[in-house]
Amino acid sequence: MIVLLTLKQYNLVQKMLSPMEKLYQNDFVPLFRLIADDYRIEAKTAERAAAIISRIGVTAPAPRKAAQLHNLASTWASKATKIQNGPFVYEVELEEPERCLLEKALDAFSRIVMGQMHILFEITDIPESIRENQHALDLYHDVYWYGRYDAKEARDLLFPAIREFGWNGGYGIASKEVAEDARLAYQLVKVLRREYVLPVTNEPIAQIIENPQLM
């Protein structure tokens, strides 16, 4: 399949892949710095938030997921061909497993960048020590569901506009209070899932060509 992308959409994928790879390596700083930049807060705030999440200690590296994203990132440019087709300036050829991988990464990215921090704990692995310890599993449960043990403090550092919201609260994806990166990623997710796309940015909706050999 081929995906037709605008320059902004193409650049977003390039921008997203490395921080998400680092996230799966249990390194939160690159993604949190991206969030800080999106919401115009100090970079050192991102490092403080990352230190809090690391200190909680309920996440572990997910090497297989990190390796998959690394492979996609390293071949992304080679999969793209420059074109001039209306608003679209790149066509990117993807195999079905790559489509699924990109859709899942963009979905997690979009949700985290809009403030849904529980997703971070959902997509990373759990340390072996926690899996075998009921008390530690209860701690993980409280962090994931309720933002306890300073998880909400970390979220509030990154997303001060939703400080007064609960752990699972926040602005909807269509809100201009949500960073454009999150909204643009949401639109790409819907395209890659072949679902209806609610326009939440001014960018044209990306397009999929299912059988390019028939063109």
Image: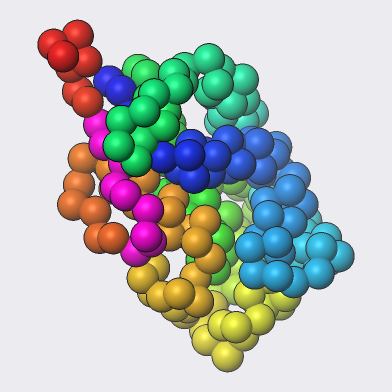
What residue is at 45 percent from the left and 74 percent from the top?
176
Residue 203 inside the magenta-drawn segment: yes
Image point (61%, 41%), residue name:
15
Q: How is the image coloured?
A: rainbow
In-image side of 147 versus 99 (left or right): right
Residue 159 at x, y percent in the picture: 63, 75
Quadrant assignment, res 157 = bottom right
Q: Is residue 156 above or below residue 68?
A: below
On the question of residue 56 being in view, the answer is no
Q: Is residue 139 above or below residue 12?
A: below
Residue occupying the far bottom of the picture? 164
* Quadrant where the N terminus is found in the figure: top left
Residue in view at x 55 percent, y 21 percent: 77
Most distant residue in the right direction: 44
| Magenta segment | 200-208
Residue 78, horizontal then vertical, whole percent: 53, 15
